[in-house]
Image (cartoon, rainbow, N blue to C red):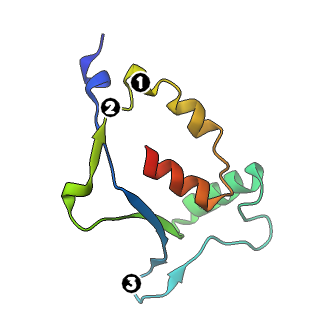
Amino acid sequence: MNDAFYDFEWTVAPRYEWQDWLDSTGRRLDIPTEGLLGMDSATRVEFTWKHLQKSGKQCGPVLGPLLQDASELRRYNPMSRAHAALFREFGDLDYRSMNAIARFAESY
């Protein structure tokens, strides 16, 4: 057994919120939606992701933790048997639902 794999710990904040991703001038960077780019189908998500990678662009919004101090953080071992269905739950996640993504982040 690879102990480092099973001993891996992950930190989770009690709440997360979607935040604008700003460039150096303070301008909001949004996911592009013109032409074939967008988030309304798996094909368009993949195409948009590849387009952004090739062009070196970043976009938002991004999911960020909300916490008063580090004592609110929770640590757990995602590779433990207790979380055996974690990857299935992630795979079943509706990528178009920002609420579903935030709920998953708050749980895992």
Is residue 29 shown above or below 39? below
The answer to whether residue 58 is visible is no
Q: CA distance from mark 1 to mark 2?
A: 9 Å
- On the rendered structure, is 100 left or right of 65? right
Expressed as whole percent of the image width and height from the top left, the position of residue 39 reads: 71, 61
The residue that label 2 is drawn on is: 77
Callouts 3 and 2 close, C-beta under 8 Å: no
Number of residues whose C-alpha sits closer than 10 Å to that of mark 1, classed few (under 14), some (14–19) or many (20 or more): few
Name the outermost residue toward the top: 1
Give the amino acid at mark 2. Asn
The residue lying at 76 percent from left, 74 percent from top is: 34
Number of residues whose C-alpha sits closer than 10 Å to that of mark 2, classed few (under 14), some (14–19) or many (20 or more): some
Asked whether 81 or 48 is in front, the reply is 81
The quarter of the image holding the C terminus is top left
The quarter of the image holding the N terminus is top left
Question: Image quadrant of residue 55?
Answer: bottom right
